[in-house]
Amino acid sequence: MVAPVLGLNPTWIVLTGIAVASALLLLRTEDGIHDFKRLSLVSAWFWSHITFVVIPSLFVYQFETGNHPERFMLSVVSSLVLVPVGVLIGHRICGARKSSVRAYYLKPVEGRRADAYSFGTICLVASGVGLALYHATQLASVPLLYMIQNPGEAAKASLLRDQAVKLLQSNMAYVYDVLAKVVFPILVMITGLRWLYLRTVWNRTVFFGTFILAVFYCGMTLEKSPVGLAVLCLVLAIYMRRKGEFKKEIWLVPIGIFGFPIVVFLYEFANSAFITGRDLLSAVPVRLFYGGAQVLFYYFDLVPETIPYQNGATIGKLAMLMGMPQSNIANYAGLRIDPTLPKSVTANAPFLGTLYADWGLTGVILGCVITGVIIALLQNYLISRPKTLRNMCIYGFVMLKITLLALAALPYVLGSGGVLIVMIPLFIEDLIGARRRRANGRRRSFPRNIVGSEARF
């Protein structure tokens, strides 16, 4: 009864339901899959994929027109099974045990000398502030300040945003991107979690100072996602402190997701007599929940009729190593959706988009399995570490970034998105530990995630 009323295709609704049921069966022992307590990386991916890709795709399939709509839906539905298959393979490789993530949340935090002091954090914050100020000096006008001083100037604010990010002629452009989307958000989590565990005046001052600086710099260019990341990192710090349970802080989630975009929208169109609440709804929530699946649809529409298969060119570093020009499909997709948008527009699709654009359905099938394996390997690697404040922050940040697979490609999430960047301290520790073991003539032993005598995945 519901499908005809909403105008949805009953066949794909049934197939999606079967795929969801299959995924829940495959992931039945995964912590956080049936509730939001003690979320694992896998369950965080699953629920973000359902919310931002699977459900919106049913509407996109019905309301958008283009090439290969069946391939589009087949890829979305099959990902619900293929990624969990990859997760099970990854768990088997690691020898993972049932309820290992739950045990990680519940075990006590190990005290480390570095957790009680903030010298390193202060150095990072100071470096971030210095880079932020240098970034501001390279701009003709700071977009955030211009928007506040000139409400209603949407076109000019949009141009300044592009000049501050996409069109910025600076060798530091990549550093600024990482600073806004990785460094400042994780600093919010680190200082927030330290204050929640060690409630001193100094830690409170460091946290609030870092949070204010992070929100200002992340919003300075009028990009929406960095501000949301900073707020969500604060939410996750509280979540980790409560050992994987949400309470009153849950109200910060919609603020993190919708707050800054709504503020920007209201400022940019402050003097327009034609902007209504309906326009606000379509500009923020609908774009967030519908936009990702819509962009994904047009990746399937463009390839291979308009754009040939990219064969890895969507992965910037791989394209550079292979001597190939980097793919511009994100720009083509943005202009296909709305030709009136600026020529510099980029429309990034969920991870399925680049898999298909590069290697077609074969890329989707193999890529989904590999994605599942990578998520499982990351999860088991992180929870096998000692539970210190720093390692808790890394786990929470990686979990947050894994949810961005619903909006971005896997190589981006792992690289520039920050997953591997924040794990660098862990890799360095492993390297130092390996050298010490070799010097002492000992072999490495791999810890297993064991809780009692529970069964394997």
Image (cartoon, rainbow, N blue to C red):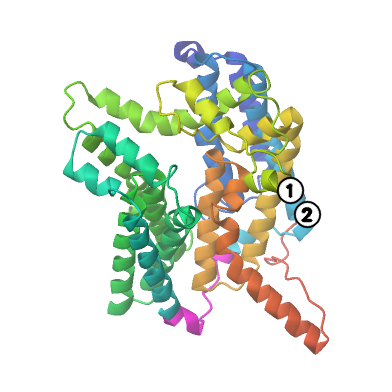
> Which quarter of the figure has residue 431?
bottom right
Is the Cβ of the residue at disc 2 closer than 8 Å to that at disc 1? Answer: yes
Mark seen at residue 92: 2
Q: Position of residue 119 (x, y in %)?
A: 42, 80
Q: Is residue 80 above or below residue 61?
A: below
- Report x, y in % for residue 425: 59, 71
Q: Position of residue 41 (x, y in %)?
A: 59, 52
Marks 2 and 1, how far apart at CA: 6 Å
Foreground pick, 157 / 448:
157
Residue 167: x percent and y percent? 43, 42
> In the rendered structure, which amino acid carries the disc numbered 2?
Arg
Q: Who's the residue at 73% across and 54% down the image?
A: 91
The answer to whether residue 34 is visible is no
Is 329 magenta? The answer is no
- Label 2 environment density (alpha carbons within 10 Å; few <14, some 14–19, many ≥20): some
Number of residues whose C-alpha sits closer than 10 Å to that of mark 1, classed few (under 14), some (14–19) or many (20 or more): some
Please give the name of the residue rendered at 42% of the width and 58% of the height, measured from the top-left corner.
Answer: 185
Instruction: Name the amino acid, label 1.
Output: Leu
The magenta segment: 104-117
